[in-house]
Image: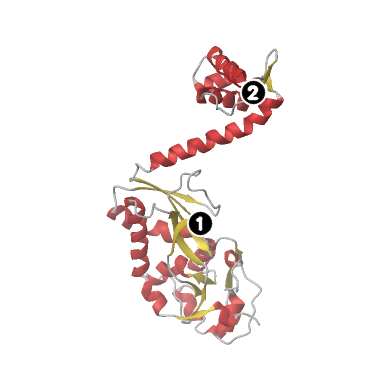
């Protein structure tokens, strides 16, 4: 018995027939005649030394050998297709596929895209707003921007900025609630997307940072951070805003952070791509542009007293 592999065309014919359980539909997929497909499968069976299909009157079914072979062949062709696409993408320095969470896409990327498009008209950005961790090769992703602790093993990864949270609100709301103590009677908005942070960066933690023991329980709760920020922008209430998602609104005056105290977390937004890809022209252009944009609003962070969440964590 030899481990010499059969021709790729025969394996491709088998894969299509095993997925469709039909020689005619497999032939249509591969754009060959049913007779040609049947010949390829017959040659594969001769190479193996046993049948892979039972031919029935109007259908086919896999034999035990066919059932053993089918999953590996299907996986192999999927891997081969993904690798081929990845290799072809290396020639493309004009299309950039970026995945980021919905909140970061809505509140950081989308409002700034005009500037990037003006600076880099040769690059076609395509965004996938998702919290699902995607595979760079399988999902044809060039860059991922993720929030959390990492680690980003075997990848190029840089933090985008130190993250903090602080109460933010409209200027009118700030006039109604001028001090941290006045927040006891204020309408507070809860962003549950940060519930995984350890130590917590929630309302009770922020109140401890300003010397209060208030633990609010009531108010609208949002699972998506951008929805919580939108509620604050609409004047619904006051939210603990995450730096990346509110810094532009603070910088441009739509929101204010009047109390001057923020809580920092070790979780960060990171710019991630496969190792070795970080210097490809379009990826480098996006990375450098993001870092330049962050620097434009650095004064917002500089105006705050930032306290590490660890310092106010419960004993």
The answer to whether any part of residue 106 appears in the image is no
Give the percent coordinates (x, y) of residue 113: 36, 55
| Dot 2 or dot 1, earlier in sequence | 2
SS for callout 2: loop
The circle drawn on residue 21 is 2
Q: How is the image coloured?
A: secondary structure
The residue shown at (48%, 67%) is 233
Q: Is residue 137 above or below residue 207?
A: above
Q: CA distance from mark 2 to mark 1?
A: 39 Å
Give the quarter of the figure containing the C terminus: bottom right
Examine the image and state in which quarter residue 6 appears: top right
Q: Which residue is mark 1?
A: 101
Give the percent coordinates (x, y) of residue 277: 39, 52
Name the foreground residue: 22 vs 70: 70
Q: Which circle, 2 or 1, is nearer the viewer?
A: 2
Name the foreground residue: 77 vs 305: 77
């Amino acid at each position: 018995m030899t481990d010499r592999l059969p021709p790729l065309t025969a394996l491709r014919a088998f894969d299509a027939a095993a997925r469709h359980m039909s020689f005619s539909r497999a032939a249509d997929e591969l754009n060959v005649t049913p007779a040609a497909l049947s010949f390829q499968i017959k040659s594969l069976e001769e190479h193996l030394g046993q049948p892979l299909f039972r031919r029935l009157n109007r259908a086919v079914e896999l034999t035990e050998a066919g059932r053993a072979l089918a999953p590996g062949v299907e996986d192999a062709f999927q891997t081969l297709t993904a690798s081929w696409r990845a290799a072809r993408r290396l020639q493309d320095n004009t299309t950039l596929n970026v995945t980021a969470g919905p909140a970061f896409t809505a509140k950081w990327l989308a409002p700034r895209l005009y500037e990037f498009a003006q600076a880099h008209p040769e690059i076609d950005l395509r965004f996938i707003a998702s919290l699902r961790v995607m595979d760079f090769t399988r999902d044809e992703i060039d860059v991922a921007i993720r929030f959390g602790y990492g680690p980003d093993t075997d990848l190029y990864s840089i933090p985008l900025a130190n993250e903090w949270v602080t109460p933010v609100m409209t200027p009118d709301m700030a006039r109604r609630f001028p001090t941290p103590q006045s927040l006891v009677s204020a309408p507070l908005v809860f962003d549950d997307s940060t519930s995984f942070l350890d130590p917590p960066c929630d309302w009770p933690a922020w109140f401890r940072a300003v010397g209060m023991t208030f633990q609010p329980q009531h108010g609208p709760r949002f699972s998506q951070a951008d929805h919580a920020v939108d509620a604050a922008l609409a004047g619904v209430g006051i939210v603990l805003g995450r730096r990346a998602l509110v810094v532009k609104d603070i910088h441009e005056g739509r929101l204010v952070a009047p109390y001057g105290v923020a809580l920092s977390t070790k979780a960060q937004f990171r710019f991630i791509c496969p190792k070795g890809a970080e210097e490809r022209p379009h990826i480098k252009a996006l990375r450098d542009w993001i870092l330049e944009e962050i620097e434009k609003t650095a004064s917002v962070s500089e105006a705050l007293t930032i306290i590490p969440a660890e310092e106010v964590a419960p004993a």
